[in-house]
Amino acid sequence: MTDTALLEAARTAKAWPFQEAQRLAKRLKDGKPGGEPVLFETGYGPSGLPHIGTFQEVLRTSLVRRAYEALTGQPTRLVAFSDDMDGLRKVPDNVPNKELLEANLYKPLSRIPNPFDTEHESFAAHNNAKLRDFLDRFGFDYEFVSSSDRYNSGAFDDALRGVLSNFDAIMDIMLPTLGEERRQTYSPVMPVSPSTGAVLQVPIEVVDAAEGIVRFTDEDGRVVEQSALGGMAKCQWKVDWAMRWVALGVDYEMYGKDLTDSGVQSGKIARVLGGKKPEGLIYEMFLDANGEKISKSKGNGLSIEEWLTYGSQESLGFYIFANPKSAKQLHAGVIPKAIDDYWQFRERLADQPLDKQLGNAVWHLLRANEHHDGPEAPGAGDTLSVPYSLLLNLVSVLGLEATPENLAEYVASYTGQAVTDPKLMKLIEGAVNYNRDFVAPTLAKRAPAGGEIEALKDLDARLAEAAPDASAEDLQTMVYEIGKVEAYGFETLRDWFRALYETLLGSEQGPRMGSFIKLYGVEPTRELIAQALSR
């Protein structure tokens, strides 16, 4: 692939990362002054641990970043920003030593003692380390930036002076969006109490914007006049968001639909501060199996750890890739199809012309965290010898006694070679886990009835005469032929296959039977038929 060919294809590519990149390129035209890297940003609130929402936002932003590079050839940066100057408003449910956090409520997260048994100096430092470990684990290329470092070091001081200088204009933007009670205490800048160290939600008076001096009433009732600079104050988060965009020079940031109004207000504030709102995509939220919005407090979501127990990182990325402006259900039931779809798209990639590759999710996923002109070359290991759905059907028949090792033996017999591909072995382990947790509890084999009985006897007889080296296609043809026998009374082939799934496997859906018989073995399949006929 040449740079020219990629550039030409990128200009007209319809995949959403390229659509986003094209909008950003139109805005920046010739790039940033002096060849400065174009800045992409994602935000993280370190009052909790990183989760699947963190993953999807960094992944999607990385996809747009790489598409932009392909489109323009310009340098880029990705900043993962931690808002660790935020005051802790409530104690999370999933932390130890809750009394320690309770005693430090409303202080900046970076100034609260670490409740975990780790060497980190603060609650935020522990969670920030978790964020970096999390992003490193998935190979993201990013720069970590801490809000507390920026405030404490004075790096945000000039931007804070801008907020204080435009105090009234910012109040004019924010007050109409607030309820009457909140208006009484609202201030764009929240001072840090000199007596308690808490981030205060109190009105302030700007004494000297250039020097950063503000006046307010402290928690003990004293009127305090102090500097807001050098970590002695923090902006309200919508103001903080806008200030950050301007101070860092952020060019692109996406966010969830629940922050749509906040994005509008922060965009107005950014203009007041002399900057502008970054380009960005507003994505839809994840839903649970019942179509309800996923909530950490409800615990109705699916964690990354849970997904990786059953599937792969690539399959998660593939599932997340599809239209981010549409809500997605995120639950265990979507994992098997996501895995098989990922490998089908990966297998197609090598044979696709460039314009089709740029519409293939796998092209974007392979490129997301790489530093080269194109995705890694498809080659060995870019096909999966056994679909995940077929592994699930096999392990469901083997039952709860199945282990990754004996499942791998079946696969080796099916493919004619030992399982050495770590990707396949990981999916074999995932299939065993998935069967244990989701498939086995739901299986219910029924007895055959009517023409199904004679059809199963016919299948058994034909399998008894099948050649030892019969291929999966030969076996599939055999099954097809039986389903077409009028005497057995199947209105459609689908009825015949449903009967096989329900009587032999205990589910309403199943695999290509020829592939299943080849993988499981002719004699073991005949034993399944015998068991069904004896019910």
Image (cartoon, rainbow, N blue to C red):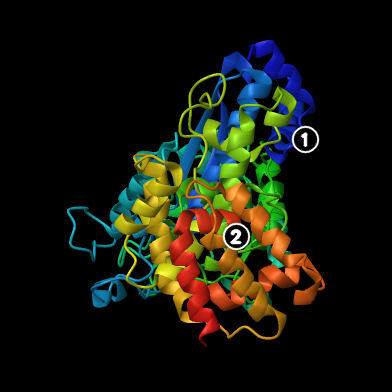
Q: Is residue 272 left or right of residue 199?
A: right
Question: Which circle marks residue 513 in the picture?
Answer: 2
Amino acid type of the residue that numbered disc 1 sits on in the rendered structure: Lys
Amino acid type of the residue that numbered disc 2 sits on in the rendered structure: Met
Q: Name above or below for residue 136 compared with residue 197.
A: above
- The local secondary structure at tag 1 comes to loop
Instruction: Indicate the position of residue 484 as horizontal and vertical percent values.
Output: 77, 65
Give the residue displayed 32% in from the left and 61% down from the top. Answer: 194
Give the residue displayed 70% in from the left and 41% down from the top. Answer: 271
Q: Is residue 93 visible?
A: yes
Q: Earlier in the sequence, mark 2 or mark 1?
A: 1
Give the residue displayed 53% in from the left and 51% down from the top. Answer: 387
Query: Which residue is nearer to you in this view: 156 or 42?
Result: 42
Q: Name above or below for residue 410 compared with residue 74.
A: below
Question: Which circle marks residue 14 in the picture?
Answer: 1
Mark 2 or mark 1, whichever is nearer to me: 2
